[in-house]
Image: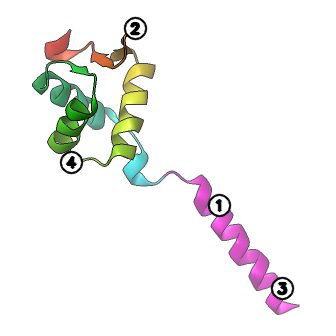
Amino acid sequence: MTRFTMTCAAAGALTLAACVPTPELSVDDIDLARYASAMAQVGCIDFDGITHAEIRDITGWKDSKLDKVEEEAIAQLQAIEQPGGGIRSTVGACA
């Protein structure tokens, strides 16, 4: 019976850990400011893989983090999706 209890406890802990966002993928105001600054450095529009790579290099983020920050910037109206593709920053030097 003890073995079963320990197995259930371990499974529960893993399930709970999966629900907590990793710090790397959480987005805060500092991330959004860093993103706005990087967007200004590349001309305010992230429209292709080259620009995306430049923003990634400037910020030091992995693609998953950059994608999460872009999603949050769009949600907070700090960036908009372009009709022809890409994302344009609407804050800071890009306003």
Please tell me which residue is depicted at 21% across the width and 48% down the height of the picture: 60
| Mark toward the start of the polypeptide (1 vs 4) | 1
Q: How far apart are marks 2 and 3 (CA)?
A: 55 Å
Mark 4 or mark 2, whichever is nearer to me: 2
Determine whether 43 is above or below 4 in the image.
above
Q: How far apart are marks 1 and 3 (CA)?
A: 18 Å
Mark 2 or mark 3, whichever is nearer to me: 2
By secondary structure, the bulk of the magenta-drawn segment is best described as helix
Q: What stretch is highlighted in magenta?
A: 1-21
Mark 1 or mark 4, whichever is nearer to me: 4
* Residue at the farthest left position: 41
* Residue under label 2: 83
| Mark toward the start of the polypeptide (1 vs 2) | 1
Instruction: Please state which amino acid type lies under the numbered disc 4.
Output: Gly
- On residue 4, the disc is 3
| Mark toward the start of the polypeptide (4 vs 2) | 4
* Residue under label 1: 16
